[in-house]
Amino acid sequence: MIRRQTVALAVLMTLLVGCGGNQPEERLLVRNPLLSPEQFGEMAPTTFQVQFETSAGNFLVEVHRDWAPLGADRFYNLVTSGYYDDTRIYRVIGDFMAQFGLNADPYVNQAWKTQFIIDDPVMQSNSRGRMTFAKGGLHTRTTEVFINYRDNQMLDSDGFAPFGEVIEGMQVVDSFFGDYGDGPPRGDGPYAAMAQARGNEYLDSDFPELTRIILATIVIPN
């Protein structure tokens, strides 16, 4: 059973009276619900799958909440809200991992960048195909995730807790565009801080060959 839970945009209708008459003029004001992260706190199912449609093909991730409950809940809410739709897989390092999770809209990135979740205990190893939240220190997980290209057990002791794994389409994951390399200061690839500040406008203009996530959809196994 596939369940698409893209959150509808909140719409506010205001009536403005014209200067020269009595006829009201309607103006539609739209606010992206992703600008309010506090509303996305639903508990994830025990097990669920996410199908990713990308410019390189499709792949399927299975999430196990008992592996990392807080990470699974956050990922579930990001997918159901449409957060990962129309985003870029901006950091691809061969024989290591592929990372994504910066939104197309810089204002959304600003809203989420301090929405930290506490680290889960590491219950599973960062083996090939496992998906894990990226982080910059203790309890700093927000929206970015990566898929391991190899067995990266050295990440286990650093507190990187896998919450799911690719169960179909790993050949698609292997084909993500990676010729740009790592970002500063290690390389000349996409600069994460700039991608956060400018969103797709920066990534598409400066790194147009990046693999694109078109749509991420929740799948509840029967």
Image: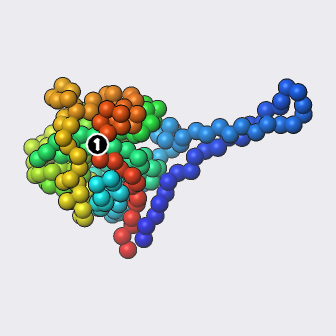
Foreground of the two, 199 or 65 = 199
User: Left of 176 or right of it: where is 39?
Assistant: right
Secondary structure under tag 1 reads loop
Residue at screen point 23% across, 46% down: 177
Asked if one can make out residue 116 in the rendered structure from this viewpoint, the answer is no
User: Left of 9 or right of it: where is 129?
Assistant: left
Foreground of the two, 66 or 201 = 201
Give x and y (percent) for residue 131.
24, 52
Which quadrant: the N terminus? bottom left
For the residue marked with disc 1, what is the amino acid?
Answer: Glu
User: Left of 75 or right of it: where is 135?
Assistant: left
Residue at screen point 33% across, 54% down: 54
* Category of crowding for the residue at label 1, using alpha-carbon neighbours closer than 10 angstroms: few (below 14), some (14–19), many (at least 20): some
User: Left of 204 or right of it: where is 25?
Assistant: right
- Vertical position of residue 222 compared to residue 192: above or below: below
Give residue 29's quadrant in the image.
top right
Foreground of the two, 128 or 122 = 128
Give x and y (percent) for residue 52.
34, 57
Give residue 154's quadrant in the image.
top left
Q: Which residue is mark 1?
A: 209
Give x and y (percent) for residue 93.
16, 42
Give x and y (percent) for residue 159.
19, 42
- Vertical position of residue 218 compared to residue 194: above or below: below
Asked if one can make out residue 47 in the rendered structure from this viewpoint, the answer is yes
For the rendered model, the colour scheme is: rainbow
Residue at screen point 20% across, 53% down: 175
Residue at screen point 79% across, 32% down: 16
Which quadrant: the C terminus? bottom left
Total marks drawn? 1
Give residue 185's quadrant in the image.
top left
The single residue placed furthest to the bottom in the displayed view is: 222
